[in-house]
Image (cartoon, coloured by chain):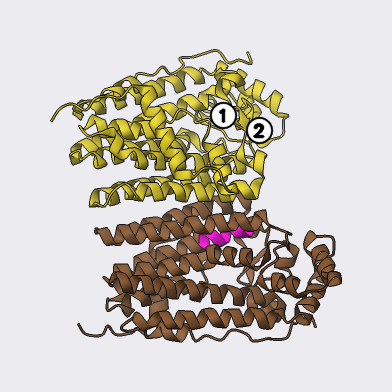
Chain colours: A brown, B yellow
């Protein structure tokens, strides 16, 4: 079998975007309008790119999985719309969030509609047992994602749950769907069960690394870089991995202060500055970065079983900030 | 082929309930707890019963489609959870709504999770192209339902959209999923394409009739009977079919009063009483009931193509109130 040509990255992105337009309509009614506004300008399209690249990596034509890949992006963006309702976040990707722009009810229902549009695309990809198997993998991941989002709401403010709980939330909220996209790409590309399992592993570790990097951003970068207000996690009382690593290593005084900051007793700007200080003092940024690097290493190792990893290797080589300075300090 | 035995109704209900328990878990975590609380005590289980009875009606064993049928109920209940968030309805089936009991964020995420649990059940039903086809039918219906719910929000307060818009909302919110359940049952039961199309028609007409009956309830029955506050549609400024039929026939003074009542300018109790008066004066209850009876007639006619309609015939013979007296008057 000839090695499938790797499409230039920009071409793949524009094909995924064309697919997203095709499956969510032309903006003729409010549902189409809100969905397109949430989808475009698009984000990094990490999940559909990984799905398509996974199909290619096992020797298939990436174009054949594009509807499925675009469907995964719809499920992802739908989850962001709902996440911003839950967190009352007014900003997403540097613009007004869907709830902020259209209202909570409209965002809720558009998220539901986008989710179903994504599933329709996923189920439209063909007529074989492989599509059914791949769809099951994605629906299980979506279910895992919902559970993790609810769990995150449940443990709001709680610093005592420890690092394993933070990792559990990351696994469900982010790694599960990335992993499912990679596995589905391999299944749809007629990869062997071993290749599908290896790409699932790859996606899971990559997803863990990427989310840890995202959780570090409020404490290491400014808002312009992330498109997400740096204060959001503190204001929403979500103690993410770097915070729990800091809590683990902190003395009693710092623990008390962290607890105050995540109980909502302190104004967000002050709370964020103090949390940044404690995270810096306890070396939590470096610790979290190290964990992210370990996950990336595992992701690369999983590719050993894959015949043409191509761009998947590059993605697992992406930089994760190492002990970057907190913008507050 | 021997005629499949029609299970006693109570046995079918308890099998569907057992399936719902199996697929949403034992209440061990918050997601399972909220989902089970929304599912039980169960409602009429109309959608899964119709799905199972449709499979039986084309000569198949109803038990084989139970996971699929239960999955449809999950999608339906998930939509109710979200609907109650949108309408800020504190009561559902005579109990506190999920949002009222657990909070809006929790209800939103549990609705998402229940929806995905339902899809997982639907996709678990087997490994054939028929399952894929039936799943597509249901996902398309769910998409239609989301669009209609958003449309309903969009035309809140608006009495000038006319009867066709009210029927469009009913078709999307209710008839689409009932219709899809019947069609899916026929597909999974290896019915012919003609039988599947006839059962789709049956479900669509039955769904229209049932929703028209539901829309009449606030103006013809008291709250204890419906488990839904009689004031809800007026308080939420949803002009449903009887209201639009009344508006069509009303004089200028009554039209102005209806407009005031659905703009939220009038206290809900007074608004509801005045709307009831106008609906009675214009004969709108009788008109809406007549339409419901027509839909039921069409549903019965669609069964001519079905070999063993059994309980489907009984369901299409259900009574729709004929010109019942408004409880306010």
Q: Are marks 2 and 1 in contact (CB under 8 Å)?
A: no
Residue A327 in the image: state x and y as whole percent.
75, 82
Kindly indicate the quadrant of the structure image that contains residue A305: bottom left
Q: Quadrant of the C terminus of chain A?
A: bottom right
Residue A208 in the image: state x and y as whole percent.
54, 73
Residue drawn 32% across the image and 19% down it: B314
Residue B93: numbered disc? 1
Residue A221 included in the magenta stretch of the image: no
Is label 2 on the same chain as label 1?
yes
Kindly indicate the quadrant of the structure image that contains residue A201: bottom left
Is residue B35 toward the left or the right of residue B138 in the image?
right
Q: Provide the chain ID for the residue under circle 2.
A: B
Q: Quadrant of the N terminus of chain A?
A: bottom left
Q: From the viewer's side, name the closer residue of A63 and B15.
A: B15
- Residue segment shown in magenta: A77-84
Residue B235: numbered disc? 2
Q: Provide the chain ID for the residue under circle 1.
A: B
Residue B62 appearing in the image: yes
Circle 1: is it few (<14), some (14-19), or many (20+) Cα within 10 Å? some
């Amino acid at each position: 079998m000839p090695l499938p040509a790797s499409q230039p990255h920009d071409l793949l992105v524009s094909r995924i975007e064309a697919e997203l337009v095709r499956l969510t309509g032309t903006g003729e009614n409010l549902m189409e309008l809100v969905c397109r506004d949430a989808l475009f300008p698009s984000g990094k399209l990490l999940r559909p790119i990984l799905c398509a690249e996974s199909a290619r990596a096992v020797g298939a034509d990436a174009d054949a999985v594009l509807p499925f890949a675009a469907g995964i992006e719809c499920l992802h963006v739908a989850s962001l719309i709902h996440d911003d309702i839950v967190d009352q976040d007014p900003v997403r990707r540097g613009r007004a969030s869907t709830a902020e722009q259209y209202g909570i009810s409209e965002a809720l229902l558009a998220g539901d509609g986008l989710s179903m549009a994504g599933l329709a695309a996923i189920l439209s990809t063909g007529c074989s047992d492989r599509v059914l198997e791949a769809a099951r993998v994605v629906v299980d991941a979506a279910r895992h994602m919902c559970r993790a989002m609810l769990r995150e709401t449940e443990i709001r403010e709680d610093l005592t749950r420890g690092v394993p709980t933070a990792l559990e939330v990351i696994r469900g909220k982010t790694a599960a769907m990335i992993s499912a996209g990679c596995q589905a790409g391999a299944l749809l590309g007629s990869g062997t069960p071993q290749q599908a399992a290896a790409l699932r592993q790859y996606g899971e570790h990559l997803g863990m690394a990427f989310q840890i990097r995202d959780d570090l951003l409020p404490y290491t970068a400014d808002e312009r870089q992330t498109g997400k207000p740096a204060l959001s996690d503190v204001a929403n009382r979500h103690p993410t991995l770097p915070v729990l690593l800091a809590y683990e290593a902190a003395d009693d005084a710092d623990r008390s202060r962290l607890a105050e900051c995540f109980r909502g007793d302190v104004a967000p700007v002050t709370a964020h500055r103090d949390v940044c200080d404690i995270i810096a003092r306890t070396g939590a940024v470096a610790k979290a970065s190290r964990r992210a690097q370990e996950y990336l290493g595992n992701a690369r190792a999983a590719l050993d079983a894959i015949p043409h990893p191509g761009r998947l290797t590059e993605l697992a080589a992406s930089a994760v900030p190492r002990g970057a300075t907190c913008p507050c300090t």
